[in-house]
Image: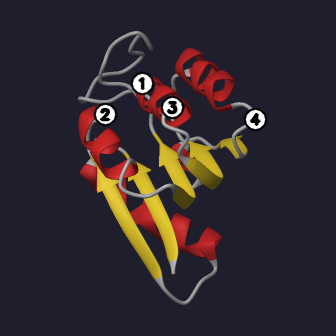
Amino acid sequence: MTNIFILDDDETRHDALIKRATELADAEETEVRIALDAEEAKNMLIKKNYWDIIMLDHDLGNRVFVDSSEENTGFQVAKFIRENNIRFGRCLLHSMNPVGVKNMLEELEGLGDVYRSPFFLMI
């Protein structure tokens, strides 16, 4: 069973993100969990100590170019991942916020394979 976690607040993108994640997983069985905001993400992520694939958006709440210090961001989720020693095989950051992505990359450095993959490259 391949465990996939997706954080993205735009439900219109979920199908494309699930499709891309399952292609990357290349497994017969996958379990996909989707969170719409940072708090929901933290509650879901903590339930497993290992995720095969994690996909994180930075800007949540239908906002763009959000400061990483705000609570409802992918950066806060990345910080939570580090602080709670949540392991993963691969993490894709699909935000168009360059500063947010940079902050998430730095926070997740050394924890696993982390890639910047803008959403438009996933569909």
Q: Position of residue 56 (x, y in %)?
A: 48, 41
Image height check: is 60 above or below 22? Answer: above
Mark 1–mark 4 distance (CA, rounded to whole Å)? 17 Å
Say what secondary structure mark 4 lies in: loop
Mark 3–mark 4 distance (CA, rounded to whole Å)? 12 Å
Q: Position of residue 101 (x, y in %)?
A: 58, 26
Mark 3–mark 1 distance (CA, rounded to whole Å)? 5 Å
Mark 3 or mark 2: name the one nearer the start of the chain: 2
Mark 2–mark 1 distance (CA, rounded to whole Å)? 7 Å
Q: Are marks 3 and 1 in contact (CB under 8 Å)?
A: yes
Q: Is residue 112 left or right of residue 55?
A: right
Question: Residue flagged by tag 2: what amino acid is it?
Answer: Ala
Q: Are marks 3 and 4 in contact (CB under 8 Å)?
A: no
Mark 2 or mark 1: name the one nearer the start of the chain: 2
Question: Residue flagged by tag 3: what amino acid is it?
Answer: Ala
- Residue 76: which disc? 1
Q: Position of residue 47 (x, y in %)?
A: 35, 55
Say what secondary structure mark 1 lies in: helix
- Residue 110: which disc? 4
Residue ID at (72%, 31%): 109
Mark 2–mark 4 distance (CA, rounded to whole Å)? 22 Å
Mark 3 or mark 4: name the one nearer the start of the chain: 3
Does residue 106 appear in this view? yes
Mark 1 or mark 4: name the one nearer the start of the chain: 1
Image height check: is 69 above or below 24? Answer: above
Question: Residue flagged by tag 4: what amino acid is it?
Answer: Gly
Mark 3–mark 2 distance (CA, rounded to whole Å)? 10 Å
